[in-house]
Amino acid sequence: MTDHSRRNFLKTSTAAAGLSLMRSLSPARVLCADVPSDASARLTPFPLGSIRLAPGIFKEQAEINARYLDSLSVDRLLHSFRVTAGISSSATPYKGWEDPACELRGHFAGGHFLSAVALASATSGNEVLKRKGDEVVSGLAQCQKKIATRFLSAYPTELFEHLVQGKPVWAPFYTYHKIMAGLLDMYVLAGNSDALQVAEGMGQWAGEYFWGISAEQRQRMLRTEYGGMNEVLVNLGALTKKSRYLETARLFEQPSILDPLAERRDELQGLHANTNVPKIIGAARMYEVTGDRRYKQIAEYFLEEVLTARNYVIGNTSLDEHWRTPPGELQGSLGWKNAECCVAYNLMKLQRLVFGWTGDARWMDAYERALFSCRLGTQNADGLKQYFFPLAAGYWRAYNSPEESFWCCTGTGAEEFAKFTDTIFFRRGSDIYVNQFIASTLDWKEEGLLIEQVTQFPREHGTTLKIKTSRPVARTIHVRIPGWTTDAAQVKINGGALEAVAGPGSYLAIRRVWQDGDTIGISLPVDLRQEALPGDDSVTAVLYGPLVLATELGPGPGEGPKTVIHSGDTAPDNLPSPEPLPKTVAGPGVGPDQWVQTESKSELRFNVATEGAKYKLMPMYQIRDQRYAVYWQAGNPKERS
Ligand SMILES: [Zn+2]
């Protein structure tokens, strides 16, 4: 979310984003019936219902998240929607950003919650959460019916009027987007057709509202964060085959953001990260639905630029929620307020889309990095989620409280931890792509083909695919050979080694007639690597495969307000200054094998000994309550000698 009023969310102001004249990216020639000529060449995910997690860290985390979602009360979630619609409610409302006085109320209750339970029901068959989702949809439908204008929100239209009038207001269309997206997820993933009807009503209301005001007023409104309104309207258009939703989606496009990206210019400095990534996701979906390649160029350039010039080693970006520096110059930017978790969620969403266009392994390498080193670990044992991801030394993880925070990152986290199966396997025609190494089963029922992925990755350096088929079947299975592995990577079919393996950072295509019981064994040797902070070669981090290694710096503050934040605030009060980065002899020409010792590859434990200090390293996702450091300060050449 924007930095608007984190401390006191009752105060309001408009976010200031640069904006040029409103105009369409190209003439309004789009019809939903248009199918891009290259659509059939795309890689697409399997339906979520065909993949199940097997026991392992991801399944464990998904179950913790599901328990948290199940702890929430439908009546309490619906409270502000009912009050707004004039329906009586005696439920105790939730607090934080769901407080009845907060201008973002409804974003989680009627939005992220629906998306998360829809995802959980599709990925795990969780019927309890599906029923809860159905109950919320039913409650929202009643509210919309009572309001009778197709509008639906947990606050009145007055806040939308503030946008038009230029009065201070937080982010009405941001919230509106979350609700529409939640409803569409309930329709697509959980089969709730009422949800589509409600979403269509909302889409029509938004369309009439936007078409009914002047271009100048629209410009003013788009200065305030509006989430993925363009994306959800494209999705609604694609689902219903109604072009008017695409036309409305175009009204939410900002040339001031998209034009420089189309021309491969990085003008991101000063912009709010999580306000803008969803706009690019919308552009990516617009390409998929219309075939307009300008949108494709925008999405690809943006992703490439952010991942190379603005990215921290964990696979996420932003300081204090913004891009604060020129590209490639992140020196001095390590603090508490790094890498808002929502931004990683949205970047990964974009990576999945862009990967689907080309099958380029680098996007799945990046996805894996963010998944293991940025997302895994941001949920605690009670299902509570992080907001920022501190990268200065000596800080720790802090989480939302169960009922008094409801941040944007609570919402995207609840979705993320409900959808770990969505990127493991993809398909292109009859070809299968194995993108991520996560214990799971793909059951491709129409083809009578089942692939069981057996792995303890990352404790195990590889994976095994077991084929079960009712009849011999000719198929090409593409396996990602990640960029972090070595040339010694090896693939065995039924125990026999293939003579050649694709190089690191690509996919190995294995075509054969598969028999029931065939196995593919993939060995992916791992080396220690280091990666400098963009703009400062003297600050470096250590990686083991996709895992960012961190060192513990002693106990964190425990269960107090510096760990679980019981308010709408997103960072603890009165933070101490960060510690100096731990020092290492690393530097140009000094590889990690010269300063990091491997204690146990299977336990993922490493050691660093420097003058006067010893450090233990482990994967960042395993750091729980400890203070930690991710980056190291290289000594000067004299100190290294
Ligand atoms: Zn967030």
Image (cartoon, helix red, strand yellow):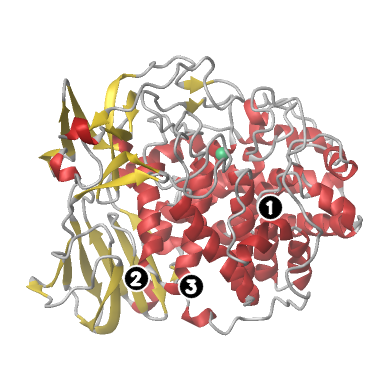
State the SS at label 2: strand
Q: Nearer the viewer, residue 610 or 132?
A: 610
In the drawing, does residue 486 fall left or right of residue 193? left
314 sits left or right of 90 in the view? left
Q: Earlier in the sequence, mark 1 or mark 2?
A: 1
Q: Residue at x 19, y 76 (%)?
A: 516
Q: Position of residue 477 (x, y in %)?
A: 29, 75
Contact between marks 3 and 2 (CB within 8 A): the answer is no
Residue 164 image position (x, y, % from top left): 88, 45
Question: What residue is shown with label 2?
Answer: 433
CA neighbours of label 3 inside 10 A, class few (<14), some (14 to 19), many (20+): some
Residue type, mark 1 in image: Met
Q: SS of the residue at dot 1?
A: helix
Residue 630 vertical placement versus 372 (above, below): above
Q: Which mark is residue 357?
A: 3
Residue wearing tag 1: 180
Residue 100 in view (yes/no): yes
Q: Is mark 2 within 8 Å of ligand 1?
A: no
Sequence-wise, which precedes: disc 3 or disc 2? Answer: 3
Say left or right for 402 vs 49.
right
Which residue: 45% across, 26% down? 398
The quadrant the C terminus occupies is top left
Q: Is residue 130 above or below residue 478?
A: above
Q: Quadrant of ligand 1?
A: top right
Q: Residues within 10 Å of mark 2 (few under 14, many from 20)?
A: many
Question: Residue type at mark 2?
Answer: Tyr
